Image (cartoon, rainbow, N blue to C red):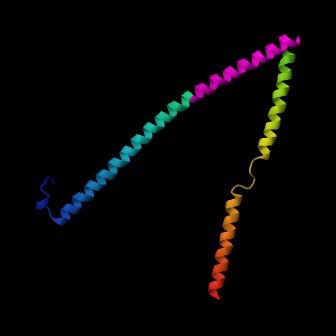
């Protein structure tokens, strides 16, 4: 309908136009949300790539540091390089195993235990109230 003089339109026509306009607006909002989500996803992917490259480079640096640590240990102690590497391997393995055991022991076996206890108390309180009302 090409009429723009709203005084000339009937109430039904105005309602129809309002419905069409709202539908068009909702459709455009959905398209805008999809476009924004796509742009956010692309930004997140680029950020994840930069983070991944950074992590890999930091790991390379740690490996180089460990090589230097082994070489320094071998040079200062007079041990062969393989023996110095074995010493550091044992040190890291023992400390790592201790960290793993401590971490495993700290994993909550009953998550949300406080919330569960509170819900049980609330349920019991509600039951008691219902029993009192029935009497």
Q: Is residue 65 left or right of residue 13?
A: right
Task: For the N terminus, give its image quadrant.
Answer: bottom left
In the image, is residue 72 part of the stretch drawn in magenta? Answer: yes
Q: Residue at x 84, y 32 (%)?
A: 94
Q: Is residue 16 left or right of residue 101?
A: left
Q: What predominant SS class does the magenta segment belong to? A: helix
Q: Which residue is drawn at 86% across and 22% down?
A: 87
Can residue 80 be seen in this snapshot? no
Task: For the C terminus, give its image quadrant.
Answer: bottom right
From this view, report whether residue 116 is shown above or below residue 40.
Answer: below
Q: Where is residue 102 in the image (x, y as percent from the top left)?
A: 80, 42
Q: Where is residue 132 in the image (x, y as percent from the top left)?
A: 65, 84
Q: Nearer the viewer, residue 20 or 114?
A: 114
Q: Which residue is drawn at 66% across and 74% down?
A: 125
Residue 37: quarter of image? top left
Residue 63: quarter of image? top right
From this view, report whether residue 69 is shown above or below residue 107.
Answer: above
Q: Which residue is drawn at 26% across and 56% down?
A: 20
Q: Where is residue 91 in the image (x, y as percent from the top left)?
A: 84, 27
Q: Is residue 34 left or right of residue 6?
A: right
Can residue 82 be seen in this snapshot? yes
In the image, is residue 117 part of the stretch drawn in magenta? Answer: no
Q: Position of residue 128 (x, y in %)?
A: 67, 79
How many numbered discs sit on the rendered protein?
0
Magenta segment: 51-78
Residue 12: quarter of image? bottom left
From this view, report whether residue 84 is shown above or below residue 46.
Answer: above
Q: In this view, does 11 lie to the left or right of 93?
A: left
């Amino acid at each position: 309908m090409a009429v723009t003089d709203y005084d000339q339109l009937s109430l039904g026509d105005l309602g129809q136009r309002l419905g069409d306009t709202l539908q068009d607006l909702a459709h455009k909002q959905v398209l805008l949300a999809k476009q924004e989500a796509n742009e956010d996803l692309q930004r997140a992917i680029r950020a994840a790539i930069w983070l991944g490259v950074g992590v890999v480079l930091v790991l390379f640096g740690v490996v180089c540091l460990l090589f230097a640590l082994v070489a320094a240990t071998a040079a200062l102690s007079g041990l062969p390089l393989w023996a110095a590497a074995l010493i550091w391997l044992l040190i890291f393995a023992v400390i790592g195993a201790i960290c793993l055991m401590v971490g495993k022991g700290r994993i909550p076996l009953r998550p949300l235990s406080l919330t569960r206890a509170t819900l049980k108390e609330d349920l019991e309180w509600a039951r008691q109230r219902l029993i009192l009302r029935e009497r």
